[in-house]
Image: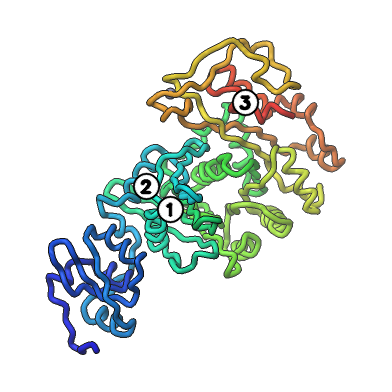
């Protein structure tokens, strides 16, 4: 039984923070140099091992009823709003080191994976995964549980996928991490997406547009209404282009609303909403609400269905500029996709300002790339190698590029402004506009890819998929 006036001696109560006391449901009752003893209603090995890592001591857990623990907590620890970030200040923490490493080398995602024989951590760098750490089998569940706790996930739920978020705050940096768990054959796989906190460093002119493309694109976003659609596969940099565009449009006179999944950057002066389909905050319904919020510019993370496409068109017709992305392979395929969604061609023609397609290509490391004469067998069989292409560069690998042969990425674009001539093509349901693009002198993704190979910026291997028709 618990005494009502139970007070923990000060030296014991200072062993842990009040956040930790509430987070783990633990009460310190005894301390020796190496062993700390706690009372808890959760006395599992997992919690014990986790506390050993977090506190750096041998931990003994004694069972106590939940009711009593709650009473102890209430009378001894001041409850504060829990911040996930504080849990990361332990300098010996493997996770902290890992996150710092990932952020330092510019990795976008961290994968924790468990197989029958081994567990590993892979980092995505410039779009490609690379193995960085092997974790002992018995350490894996401990690390996963720590991650789940930090991200506010239920550690007892191991059979269903979960999503959470961690905010990291250090003296030098502040950023968010989106955490996703997936039950796999041998345990839970966790993927951490590192989300940049601010978009200060993003500039349209730095992304990869040619001068001409940048001019064309800027003309289409100057219009007060209409739709700007950016297409490309996952990881092709669409969101970065959208944020750079929003940054340009962001001023005191303009009301900008966004609905995103996830919010990857925060932009001051812009009203950003996180998509949450479980409570009905989906793209199309939020877009409908936005229209009552007196917007000038609306950014919709993605047009996934006809409902969202129709809402975007409605917004454009009522005098708003709508920016969005769509999952297609080319600027022209975007228009076909909208037609497939039963959007009448005349409406597409009257609302779409521009259709943009983009890809990200890795740039060869300038310290180790190696030049050689063009090797026809490196190109797709049916691809006609342009005559002006005489040499090509290949990836080698050195200490500067973590032995990948590449360093950094650059976007390539295909920008089709929707003109009167094109509207005729759309209305006639003509699906091949190669000659139109040639007449208008619009560079395709393929043309731009070959230019980068010619300039030694990237390798043939890196753009191979774009050279196949
Ligand atoms: Zn290198």
Q: Is residue 4 above or below residue 386?
A: below
C-beta proximity under 8 Å, tags 2 and 3: no
Q: Secondary structure at mark 1?
A: strand
| The C terminus sits in image quarter | top right
> What residue sits right under mark 2 in the picture?
99
Q: Quadrant of ligand 1?
A: top left
Q: Earlier in the sequence, mark 2 or mark 3?
A: 2
Residue at 56%, 64% (x, y): give it: 276
Q: Which of marks 3 and 1 precedes in the sequence?
A: 1
Work out how far the residue at label 1 is from the one at label 2, CA to CA, in angstroms: 10 Å
Residue 272 position, x and y percent, is 50, 57
Residue depicted at 69% across the width and 26% down the height: 467
Look at the image and tell me whether residue 419 can be seen: yes
Mark 1–mark 3 distance (CA, rounded to whole Å):
32 Å
Nearer to the camera, 153 or 170: 153
Q: What number of labels is visible?
A: 3
Q: Which residue is mark 1?
A: 177
């Amino acid at each position: 039984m618990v005494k009502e006036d139970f007070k923990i001696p000060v030296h014991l109560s200072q062993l842990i923070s009040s956040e930790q006391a509430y987070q783990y449901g633990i009460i310190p009752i005894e301390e020796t140099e190496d062993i700390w003893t706690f009372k808890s209603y959760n006395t599992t090995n997992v919690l014990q091992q986790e506390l050993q890592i977090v506190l750096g001591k041998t931990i003994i857990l004694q069972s106590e009823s939940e009711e009593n623990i709650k009473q102890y907590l209430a009378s001894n620890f001041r409850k504060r709003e829990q911040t996930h970030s504080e849990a990361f200040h332990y300098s010996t923490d493997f996770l902290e080191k890992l996150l710092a490493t990932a952020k330092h080398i510019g990795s976008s995602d961290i994968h924790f994976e468990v197989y029958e024989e081994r567990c590993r951590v892979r980092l995505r760098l410039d779009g490609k995964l690379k193995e960085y750490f092997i974790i002992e089998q018995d350490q894996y569940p401990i690390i996963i549980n720590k991650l789940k706790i930090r991200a506010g996930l239920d550690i007892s739920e191991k059979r269903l996928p979960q999503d959470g978020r961690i905010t990291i705050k250090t003296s030098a940096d502040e950023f968010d991490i989106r955490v996703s768990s997936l039950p796999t054959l041998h345990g839970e796989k966790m993927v951490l997406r590192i989300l940049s906190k601010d978009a200060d460093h993003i500039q349209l002119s730095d992304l990869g547009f040619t001068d001409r493309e940048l001019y064309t694109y800027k003309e289409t976003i100057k219009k007060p209404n209409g739709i700007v659609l950016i297409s490309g596969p996952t990881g092709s940099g669409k969101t970065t282009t959208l944020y750079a565009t929003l940054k340009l449009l962001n001023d005191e006179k303009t009301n900008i609303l966004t609905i995103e999944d996830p919010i990857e950057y925060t932009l001051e002066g812009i009203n950003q909403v996180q998509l949450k389909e479980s409570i009905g905050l989906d793209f199309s319904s939020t877009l409908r609400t936005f229209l009552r919020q007196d917007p000038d510019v609306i950014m919709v993370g993605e047009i996934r269905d006809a409902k969202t496409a129709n809402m975007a068109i409605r917004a454009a017709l009522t005098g708003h500029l709508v920016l969005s992305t769509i999952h297609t392979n080319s600027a022209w395929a975007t228009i076909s996709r909208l037609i497939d969604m039963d959007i009448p061609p005349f409406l597409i023609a009257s609302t779409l300002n521009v259709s943009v397609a983009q890809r990200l290509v890795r740039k060869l490391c300038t310290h180790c790339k190696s030049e050689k004469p063009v090797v026809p067998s490196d190109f797709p069989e049916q691809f006609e190698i342009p005559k002006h292409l005489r040499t090509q560069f290949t990836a080698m690998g050195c200490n500067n590029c973590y032995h990948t042969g590449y360093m950094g990425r650059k976007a390539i674009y295909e920008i089709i402004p929707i003109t009167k001539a094109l509207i005729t093509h759309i209305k006639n349901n003509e699906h091949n506009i190669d000659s139109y693009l040639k007449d208008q002198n619009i560079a395709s993704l393929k043309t731009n890819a070959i230019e980068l190979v010619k300039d030694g910026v990237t390798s043939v291997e890196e753009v191979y998929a774009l050279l196949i028709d």
